[in-house]
Amino acid sequence: MTDIQTNASKPTTADEGQRAYVLLVANSKGGVLKTTTACQVTSWFAKNGYKTLLIDADRQQSSADWVTLHHGRGLDTETLTCVQVTGEALKRQVRNLSKMFDVIVIDVDGNGDEDDTTLRAALKVCDRVVIPFFPCGLDARALNDFMKAVTAAQQTAHFPVSLFLARDFPADTSRPKVQTFVEAQWPEIKVDFLRSRILTRRSMVDVMSDGFSVWDFATRTGRYRDPKAVTDFEYLISELFPEIAASVGLTTETVVAETAAEV
Ligand SMILES: Nc1ncnc2c1ncn2[C@@H]1O[C@H](COP(=O)(O)OP(=O)(O)OP(=O)(O)O)[C@@H](O)[C@H]1O
Ligand SMILES: [Mg+2]
């Protein structure tokens, strides 16, 4: 197993021995696939033998509900743990729990307001923020307070910020427009614009509602199976964690080849 701390996306914050890599999935907008992304990425690590913790820091508790369903089906019971934490306590919990896990994924719905203690706490302890972004002008403008909170946190912790298009449509070419907009609007933040796109897929609604991950159907048949949804997330993981993904034969090139073979 590749050591998560030796991955190319290694944290730049102070490190006290072995501790978990902390990925924060965040956006102030609702319904942009934060929970879906957090659950699918966590499940990928769990299935690859990493001790993974999903922290549900959203009062809606959707990630925690998904884990209850997922475990109820006997899936990832040994390697995937979930806790619900909000507010200032998140910092302490992550610091304590990070010694027990290889990777921690935090699902947070923070808006970046002054009193948004949960998002601010999460930004203090993360190694990377990943923003699922629905390519729509209104979503972009609503991101202002959230981006300000990210900028403020980056004054003391130099974590990378990655953005990918979520609920995108196959024929869309929004990425350059989104990049131009974000760079003009928040020039102080260096955003890594991923090539990954999680496309709008009906299958994903059922997969999430019924407590599955796309990986549960990667090699099986059944109504939940959607190889294209699998490749969406494989591509995302190979961009976010290139060395870890490569250690199990997954690179952006192999995913593209896989996608081409499916067409
Ligand atoms: N690829 C997809 N295409 C279309 N719908 C999807 C896809 N993946 C997930 N969904 C559905 O979209 C809805 C919103 O997704 P999700 O709950 O992950 O968003 P969120 O950002 O966490 O929302 P919230 O702000 O409410 O926490 C859910 O019903 C989910 O099942
Ligand atoms: Mg959610």
Image (cartoon, rainbow, N blue to C red):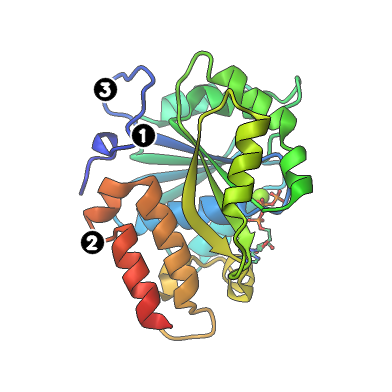
The disc labelled 3 sits on which kind of residue? Gly
The crowding category of the residue bearing disc 3, from other C-alpha atoms within 10 Å (few below 14, some 14 to 19, many at least 20), is few
Any mark on residue 236, and which? none
Placement of 28 over or under 209, stated as above or below: above
- Give the Cα separation between the discs numbered 3 and 1: 10 Å
**Mark 1 highlights which residue?**
20
Quarter for ligand 1?
A: bottom right
Q: Amino acid at mark 2?
A: Gly
Q: Choose between 252 and 243: the one closer to the eye.
A: 252
Residue 69 pos. (x, y %):
57, 63
- Give the mark nearest the N terminus, 1 or 2: 1
Quadrant housing the C terminus: bottom left
Residue positioned 66% across, 40% down in the render: 181
Q: Element type at marker 3? A: loop
* Quarter residue 67 falls in: bottom right
- Disc 1 to disc 2, how far (Cα)? 23 Å
**Which is more N-terminal, label 3 or label 2?**
3
246 in relation to 155, above or below: below
Instruction: For mark 1, give the secondary structure.
Output: loop
Q: Residue shown at 54%/84% (left/top)?
A: 223
- Quarter-wise, where is residue 233 in the image? bottom left
To which residue does mark 2 refer? 249
Q: Nearer the viewer, residue 4 or 57?
A: 4
- Res 118 visible: no
Residue type at mark 1 is: Ala
The spot of residue 259 in percent (x, y) is 40, 74
Q: Which mark is residue 17?
A: 3
- What percent of the width, then of the height, locates residue 68? 56, 58
The answer to whether mark 1 is within 8 Å of ligand 2 is no
